[in-house]
Amino acid sequence: MKILGKLVRYGKVLWLVGVVLLSANTSLLTKTKVEASSYPWGGAVCVATGQVSGKCPNYEWSYNGQVRNPTTGNYYYRNCTDYVAWRLINSGIPLSKVSGLGGAGSWDDNAPQKGLTVSGVPTPGSAGVDERYGHVVYVDSVSGSTITISEFNWGSTGSYGSRTGTAGQLGLSKFVSFGSSQQSSGSYEQYYSGSGVKSASFLGADRLYPGQVMRANQYIESFNTKYVLLMQPDGNLVEYGGEAFNAVWNTRTSGNPGAYVAYQTDGNLVVYASDGRPLWWSGMRSGSNQLVLQNDGHLVNYNPWHNPLWYTGVHFTDSDVYAGASVINSGGRLMQNQYIRSGDGRYSLRMQADGNLVVYGPGSHALWNTRTFGNPGSRLEVQYDGNLVIYNRYGGAIWWSGMRANSKLLFMQSDGNLVQYDLWWRPLWNVGTNGRL
């Protein structure tokens, strides 16, 4: 069974409507207008003249002579930001966390400055960001891959509305978590969170090609080893990475053991249940050529000209530089933000910006480190005397392994072990991480 998708233009917005073959007509995306909500400032009046079809051209509504709402942190009345801020404050989130997040399209960019978490995972009580149109919504509930949101000013009408669909169907790429009890109780199970890929099988690449299938306990991994896309045994397709092997995006299809994901020849990425029922899909994309898990964590569907056709919208800063090998020869260095990786592409040795030297398993799962963090600008030197030394930016040694005669190189192996060999390929020193994931 395959999923057909078509784009329907409604105003300025493209809605993705899916129809399942051989099944009854199913509404996958609904948009309902509610006559009224408990939002207290729904009676604010449009400032501009020439209001057409209930729309306010400059998005400014006045309430008691003011266009900004001091109660919510000076967001504009009847705008999406004001409504979401009001919902958050009513749920117990401090005003200091809600105010000052800027325009709707920049909430995900400004949130980390307030200590808020941004990811591709929706939770009840979080704020969803539509970066296409600069719009934020309040996530009311999450059921599997389906989200129900409420909002104000969708379509510049300055009125209340509710929609239900997947994150992709709703156009939501980022979610800002404010740490409410509602979010905690509604969070999904992170099957592998913090523990690495365990016994999962690596497909040997950072991408999928049309017609390729990823079954339970299989994964692809970004070239820099920081991120993995894993088809979990519970049926959830999850991207892990970032700090401490955390989940950063998922399809919310857990509870379906035996499910698998197919990157179809029509460009649609579909999670199927074991009986062939579609559980989640991205939508057809004509001309799709490859689905790539990039070094910045972004999962992107490209055409042959490397134009993006679909993407998760979840990505992070990537400042690391590949040193071009799996070894560092005697006399060589690993500078700040450089890394080497194992020949099979699963493991890396990384000289971090904070001065810590770390061996990582798939998806940024730390296996060993020198505990030298707090020393930005440090470097690793594989000295001719066999000593592995980390020097800080002032030239002072802050960690070393000890001198070893006839050292040849330091090798990041495909079994996960970091080993120093002599001229005759006899091991001189290792960190003991072989076999760990």
Image: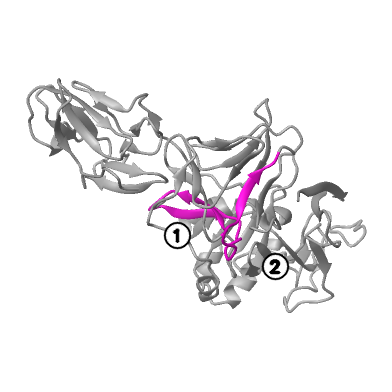
Q: Is residue 260 magenta?
A: yes
Residue occupying image coordinates x 47% and y 61%: 191
Q: Residues within 10 Å of mark 1 (few under 14, many from 20)?
A: few
Q: Which residue is mark 1?
A: 115
Q: Which residue is mark 2?
A: 148
Closer to the camera in the image, 206 or 317: 206
- Judged from the image, the secondary structure of the residue bearing numbered disc 1 is loop
Closer to the camera in the image, 95 or 139: 139
Q: Position of residue 167 (x, y in %)?
A: 67, 57
- Judged from the image, the secondary structure of the residue bearing numbered disc 2 is strand
Sequence-earlier tag: 1 or 2: 1
Q: Position of residue 146 (x, y in %)?
A: 68, 64
Q: Position of residue 415 (x, y in %)?
A: 31, 39
Residue occupying image coordinates x 31% and y 47%: 436
Horizontal side of residue 319 vs 404, given as left or right:
right
Residue occupying image coordinates x 76% and y 77%: 37
Type of colouring: one colour
Quarter of image, res 53: bottom right
Quarter of image, res 54: bottom right
The part of the chain drawn in magenta is 235-264
Residue 328 position (above or below residue 124): above
Q: Amino acid at mark 2?
A: Thr
Horizontal side of residue 149 vs 214, given as left or right:
right
Distance from label 1 to label 2 (Cα)?
Answer: 26 Å
